[in-house]
Amino acid sequence: MDKLIEQLTKRLFVELEASGRHVHLSKDAAMYLFGHPLTPAKPLSQPGQFAAQERVCLRGPKGSMERVAVLGPERSDCQVELSRTDCVALGIDAPLRDSGDVANTPGITVSNGDRSLDLPQGVIVAKRHIHMTPEDASARGLKDGQQVQLRSLTERPLTFEEVTVRVSPKYQTYAHLDYDEANACGFRKGDMGMIL
Amino acid sequence: MDKLIEQLTKRLFVELEASGRHVHLSKDAAMYLFGHPLTPAKPLSQPGQFAAQERVCLRGPKGSMERVAVLGPERSDCQVELSRTDCVALGIDAPLRDSGDVANTPGITVSNGDRSLDLPQGVIVAKRHIHMTPEDASARGLKDGQQVQLRSLTERPLTFEEVTVRVSPKYQTYAHLDYDEANACGFRKGDMGMIL
């Protein structure tokens, strides 16, 4: 009985996570800014991903933000993921994109102390998405790239439309929102979403 | 034909508006802070309501915000409407409430120059809602107090669940979101919502 409930729950619900603003750096960028590769400080929900000890300052035309999280490991391209609230504060009109899709996006200045890097592009507002293991996807009849509706079971319930499901054996199953979305639905850590 | 389309559009759609953080003051509070009643600077979408020339500073345990909008006319109770993002910045855990429902809410410090007022209560995160004229409500078969789902026709579409419809001949028909909600759906001025 407990197992049935667990399976049903797993089929219907997905744990929500809110991603704050963060930066992905290339190996070269990390070496330039810190003089060494990124140092893992805290593992993230996605296996192998980590929050680094290193932090950076972001500067746009209208403002700057100190101690912004850097996520590792290093990637081939630098990418800066902001909420729209952050975009307004920094004065950068970043487009809504899937992670990794940085062609023709605005640039930004990333710095650590007196080491400063003018990225010509890479600033995006990340599209909400669900990371899913192949097992969880198959239990739900979902395929990689499929769009679903996700209802937040939160204080201010919302249904997120057009949420992309990404399936990989490298993932753990979590829905990722940014802080505008998390705040809009009254998200608290541990809250679940239901795939409609 | 044009009239039919207009009527259909009116029946299905509602214009969205985003409300930034703002303060409502009692007559006494306005007199204390400014030495005179509020001065209308800009009319709002709801008839008789205005943004005042006067602005205030808000101070909470973790931060402060300068030049915060004051909306008039004066009300019987002071009320401060924040987004959750603002709440985090100020260090105030305000509850989600309908406007006017300020019993047992946290307080805040409101000031103008060296005139400072410690409000013992009044800070809320305003529940999203739709203001509606009796004509528009009747055309949609809706009643005052009814809860509806509102789908945003925006860049990042969302369906807002549990949106309260408020009907009054004093209203114009507009759906009101806060900036977390507006940013979460990628709202741009003029965007519409559809009542489901």
Image: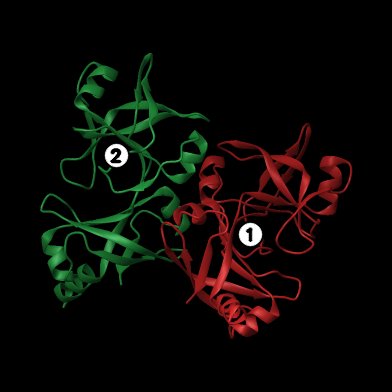
Chain colours: A green, B red
Q: Quadrant of the N terminus of chain B?
A: bottom right
Q: Quadrant of residue A104?
A: top left
Give the image location of residue B123, x and y in percent. Answer: 63, 53
Mark 2 lies on residue: A103
Please provide percent x and percent y for residue A34: 27, 18
Tell me the distance, in whole angstroms, between the alpha carbons under discs 1 and 2: 50 Å
Q: Which residue is mark 1?
A: B104
As rendered, which of B192 and A155 lies closer to the eye?
A: B192
Tag 1's secondary structure? Answer: loop
Relative depth, front residue between A184 and A145:
A145
Front residue of A116 and B22: A116
Q: Are marks 1 and 2 in contact (CB under 8 Å)?
A: no
**Is residue B74 toward the left or the right of residue A8 in the image?**
right
Question: Who's the residue at 38% across and 31% down the image?
Answer: A107
Is A116 above or below relative to A122? above
Label 1 is placed on what type of residue? Answer: Asn
Q: From the viewer's perspective, is B31 left or right of A46? A: right
Query: Looking at this rendering, what residue extends furthest in the top direction?
Result: A114
A79 left or right of B5 in image: left
Q: As drawn, which residue projects farthest toward the right?
A: B36
Mark number for residue B130? none
